[in-house]
Amino acid sequence: MNVAATKLFEVVPLSKHIGAEIRGLDLSRPVDEATRAAVYQAWLDHTVLIFRDQKLTQEDHLRATSIFGEHAGIRRPPKYFPAGFHRVLPGIMFISNIRENGEPIGALPDGEMMFHHDMIHHEIPDKATLLYSVEIPSHGGNTLFASGYSAYETMEPELRAKLEGKIAKHHYNYGSTIKGDNRGTEAFAACNHPVFRTHEETGRKTVYVNRLMSTGIEGMDDSEAIPLLEKVFDHAEKMEFVYSHQWRVGDLVIWDNRCSTHAREDFPADQRRLMLRTTVKAGVRPYL
Ligand code: OGA
Ligand code: MN
């Protein structure tokens, strides 16, 4: 007897190159293995997934994170909890401008942020980041996602040839949002990775340098390397490769840090913004 295929959920692309909305899935409940595998495949296909109108507890958020792999440990526990939060589960971080006793309760509190890959300055960067919006400003604060695949595939051949096979240097002071802003903590991490990497699951090549954290090229003088990198950034950040996410409360967004960069637009400093963030471990060091 034939069993009718169940339609699990809908995948609605949000731009030509990157991003899709998943409709018809309530992440406050566990998903079965077939659904998990289908969501994972949709994520590999679209790089960024948006789940709207979710009502998630922190436990739900962690369970949704596990759809994509093993969640990475907490990096910065909040010092203060806003009303309604008496505790934060291990693995969850706040991204917020809310201040208590004059200090932000979360990381990356204010304003605009340059395009970047999360954790590129580590040896094995986390493969994914999930952000869940709890409070958002009345306007501004969009998060922009740019496809590293498209940037690679459409790059001027001459520029691409100059950087093919090369290794880039990355440096990041935690909390910095614009290169050279001196806003980050003194603590920093640095690491070198291929300028163009192969995504270990899709097998596709992608640009793997970014304006916020990439500082040079191994074995190349800065006088040559910096202008080349600037050209790559200008190309990779073209709006045609970007999906701009306008937040609503209850959005869960997951992005693939291996093959995309993201940036944040400015927003009013006097309006609250609160996101809960988790990340997913990767299994391999980026390779050529
Ligand atoms: C992040 C990040 C962007 C935003 O959490 O890694 O870049 O819109 N956040 O807050
Ligand atoms: Mn980020």
Image: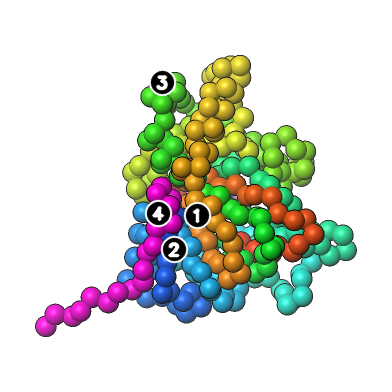
Magenta span contains residue 31: no
Q: Is residue 236 visible?
A: yes
Q: Which mark is residue 158?
A: 3
Find out whether the residues at labels 4 and 1 contact each other: C-beta distance under 8 Å.
Answer: no
Q: Nearer the viewer, residue 244 or 228?
A: 244
Q: What is the C-alpha distance between the residues marked 3 and 1?
A: 30 Å
- Horizontal side of 97 relative to 116 (left or right) equals right
Q: Which element type, helix, strand or loop, lies under badge 1? A: strand
Segment tinted magenta in the rendering: 1-18
For mark 4, what is the residue? 46
- Identity of the amino acid at label 2? Glu
Q: What is the C-alpha distance between the residues marked 3 and 4?
A: 28 Å
Q: Residues within 10 Å of mark 2 (few under 14, many from 20)?
A: some
Residue drawn at the location 61% of the way across and 69% of the way down: 249
Q: What is the C-alpha distance between the residues marked 2 and 1?
A: 12 Å
Q: Quadrant of residue 85?
A: bottom right
From this view, report whether residue 143 is shown above or below residue 274. above
Find out whether the residues at labels 3 and 4 contact each other: C-beta distance under 8 Å.
Answer: no
Q: What is the C-alpha distance between the residues marked 3 and 2?
A: 36 Å
For mark 2, what is the residue? 21
Instruction: State the quadrant of the C terminus.
Output: top left
Residue drawn at the location 49% of the way across and 33% of the way down: 235
Magenta span contains residue 11: yes
Find out whether the residues at labels 2 and 1 contact each other: C-beta distance under 8 Å.
Answer: no
Q: Residues within 10 Å of mark 1 (few under 14, many from 20)?
A: many
| Residue 23 image position (x, y, % from top left) | 42, 70
For the stretch drawn in magenta, the main secondary structure is: loop
Q: Earlier in the sequence, mark 3 or mark 1?
A: 3
Q: Which mark is residue 101?
A: none
